[in-house]
């Protein structure tokens, strides 16, 4: 019986050890999960701040360009000229789009004035096909 009591005691101790170890591992995992969530939240906040900085830079650049494009500092004159050239190209492209739209509109009107295309075959074509079908 002594062997059984020893076995029972060792099994109980092992189960208690495993239970305590499992609890410790679960607590450690929970702590790591909290830290990972905190890191993710902080990274999202950094992305938001970077976006704010990017928007502020864009606004600053727009304000500078609008106020100083003609009298830009030598270090910024090339960038202002590049922006001006791109804006001019955009205006040209928009004019081209309007020309194409006008051309489309005119072509639609001219197609409406044309005679409609014949959808049905001539009667002679139908009779010709009918004769060939009957002859076979």
Image (tube, grey):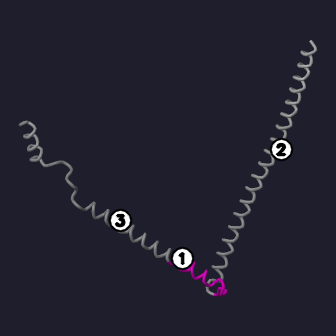
Q: Residue at x 72, y 67 (%)?
A: 53
Circle 3 or circle 1, nearest the eye: 1
Q: In the image, residue 110 lies at what x, y percent?
A: 28, 64
Question: Tag 1: Cα neighbours inside 10 Å, few (<14), some, or many (≥20)?
Answer: few
Q: Is residue 40 above or below residue 11?
A: below
Nearer to us in this view, 107 or 129: 129
Query: What's the mark number on residue 68?
Result: none
Q: On the rendered structure, is 131 left or right of 118? A: left
Nearer to us in this view, 41 or 28: 28
Give yes or no for residue 130 being in the magenta stretch. Answer: no
> Do the numbered discs 2 and 3 sit on residues whose CB atoms are within 8 Å?
no
| For marks 2 and 1 on the same chain, the one whose residue lies earlier in the sequence | 2
Query: Which residue, as the protein is rendered here, is positioned at the far front?
Result: 3
> Do the numbered discs 2 and 1 sit on residues whose CB atoms are within 8 Å?
no
Q: Residue at x 42, y 72 (%)?
A: 96
CA separation in Å, label 2 and label 3: 67 Å
Q: Residue at x 67, y 86 (%)?
A: 73
Provide the residue designation for mark 2: 31
Query: Which residue, as the protein is rendered here, is positioned at the far right?
Result: 2
| For marks 3 and 1 on the same chain, the one whose residue lies earlier in the sequence | 1
Nearer to us in this view, 115 or 37: 37
Q: Is residue 106 above or below residue 131?
A: below
Give yes or no for residue 80 being in the magenta stretch. Answer: yes
Provide the residue designation for mark 1: 87
Q: Is residue 101 above or below residue 4?
A: below
Query: What's the mark number on residue 105?
Result: 3
Q: Is residue 38 above or below residue 96?
A: above
| For marks 2 and 3 on the same chain, the one whose residue lies earlier in the sequence | 2
What secondary structure is found at the residue carrying circle 3? helix
Residue range (magenta): 71-88
Circle 2 or circle 3, nearest the eye: 2
């Amino acid at each position: 019986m002594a062997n059984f009591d020893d076995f029972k005691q060792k099994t109980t101790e092992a189960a208690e050890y495993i239970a305590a170890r499992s609890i410790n591992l679960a607590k450690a995992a929970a702590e790591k999960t909290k830290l990972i969530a905190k890191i993710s939240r902080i990274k999202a906040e950094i992305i938001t701040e970077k976006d704010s900085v990017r928007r502020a830079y864009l606004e600053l650049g727009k304000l500078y360009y609008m106020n100083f494009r003609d009298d830009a500092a030598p270090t910024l004159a090339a960038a202002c000229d590049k922006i001006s050239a791109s804006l001019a190209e955009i205006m040209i492209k928009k004019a081209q789009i309007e020309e194409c739209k006008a051309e489309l509109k005119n072509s639609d009107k001219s197609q409406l004035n044309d005679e409609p295309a014949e959808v049905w075959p001539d009667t002679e074509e139908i009779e010709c096909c009918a004769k060939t079908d009957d002859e076979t």
